[in-house]
Amino acid sequence: MSTPTATTVKQNNPYQNALQQLDKALSFLDVEPGLADVLKKPQRELTVHFPVAMDNGSTRMFTGYRVHHSLVRGPSKGGIRYHHQVDLDEVRALAMWMTWKCAIVNIPYGGAKGGVVVDPRQLSLRELERMTRRYATEISILIGEEEDIPAPDVNTNPQTMAWIMDTISMHEGHSVLGVVTGKPVDVGGSQGRVEATGRGVMYAAREAAHHMDMPLAGTRVVVQGFGNVGSVAARLMAHYGCKVVGVSDQYGAIYNPRGLDVNGVLDALKTTGKVGGYQDAQPISNTDLLTLPCDILIPAALENQITAENAEQIQARLIVEGANGPTTPEADDILNKRGVFIVPDILANAGGVTVSYFEWVQDIGFFFWSEEEVNDRLRAVMIRSFNDVLKIAQEKSTDLRTAALILAVLRVAKALEIRGIYP
């Protein structure tokens, strides 16, 4: 089987993919062309270049971004990722997808995203903290608990959010708990937030499997990416009787057709730093993982993983997108023609932003909920949203991604039309 080349990945521009998906949804709708143009462009973009003092006394320059796609339905919301391949087009796409995601689950946010071009593994903890605080200071002209609320994403975590919250609080002279979400519970975070995205993926998979008359017990699951989203989704799917047969991280993948002990893989990850440390499985490549025999595939790594080059070899009947933008439009067409049921990212992984909204509400109200309350509310939102999208897909005779975008674009365009164009 062929491996996607660097040229192939570069051609799969995430922002162009997002625009292509939007155009497909617009073809089903009667949206005024001028309003459609508004939806295609980010409202504002910020690029920052900033110095950070390294532990050895040297100074290193970093580049970061923060993009607001839309604020028409409320403050903008979106994660911050640390990755050496972050670029402006990727952040633009992710911000747009966040707008649709928030609209699909019907929470009063618009979309934003941020990122820093860095491999965080190459920094010490103190260097990472200094870089985070300086980046937060640079983008502080855009963020705020009533303007734009960041959250964790690839290679960022609750500690990262705590540093950002503390930095903004120092600027303001008082604690601003609601300026970020995904914080540790001890400093205003919400119960259930760490597991929220993976738990939402599980709910989406469960609803889709029920729609397809696919019993979860014994169903073979492959999870690409064993970070916060993928590992939680794998553990919860196993809890419901699924047989997780393959998982991967950035170092490689493992496969056992008899099933993996997910808790054992988690233990190996903690001990060795990689899923390959788990012994009762055979090592395979990340490329081969995607085409393993399975019933459910959960891509939970980065964008552009399922492409025109490998879509024909995908064996899963159901794909539930834990990552943002893992499937290119060309691959979508191939998979849809083959009858593969795809729960798109803007629906499947919306559990994270949903519980981020819950956290923000709790922070502003200074009143906090139990984990059971959070999970109950999340389950209700995910089930309702899945059924809303499925109904449109059936009415329009289209795929779930296009149906999700139709729902999201309708809600955003309606808000834009009602508010009017200033001045």
Image: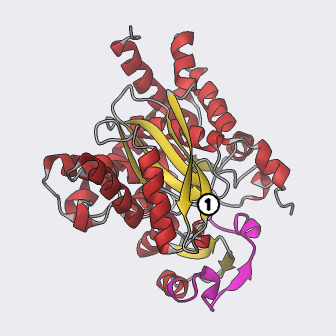
x then y, percent, for residue 398: 59, 33
How many C-alpha atoms fall within 10 Å of the one at disc 1: few (<14), some, or many (≥20)? few
In the rendered image, the vertical position of residue 122 relative to residue 269, given as above or below: above
At x 70%, y 39%, the residue is 329
**Quarter that holds the C terminus:** top left
Secondary structure beneath label 1: strand
**Quarter that holds the N terminus:** bottom right
x then y, percent, for residue 28: 57, 21
- Amino acid under disc 1: Arg
Judged from this view, the residue extending furthest toward the bottom is 279
The answer to which of 397 and 178 lies nearer the viewer is 178
Let me know if residue 351 is in the magenta part.
Answer: no
Colouring convention used in this rendered image of the protein = secondary structure
x then y, percent, for residue 200: 41, 56
Q: In which quarter of the image is residue 277?
A: bottom right
Can see residue 206? no
Query: Which residue carries the number 1 mark?
Result: 60
The answer to which of 200 and 312 lies nearer the viewer is 200
Let me know if residue 295 is in the magenta part.
Answer: yes
Horizontal arrangement in the rendering, residue 94 relative to residue 188 (left or right): right
Judged from this view, the residue extending furthest toward the front is 57
In the rendered image, the vertical position of residue 36 relative to residue 112, given as above or below: above
Can see residue 249? yes
Range of the magenta residues? 270-297
At x 76%, y 69%, the residue is 288
Judged from this view, the residue extending furthest toward the right is 2
Q: Quadrant of residue 376?
A: bottom left
In the rendered image, the vertical position of residue 153 relative to residue 78, given as above or below: below
The answer to which of 118 and 224 lies nearer the viewer is 118
At x 79%, y 43%, the residue is 11
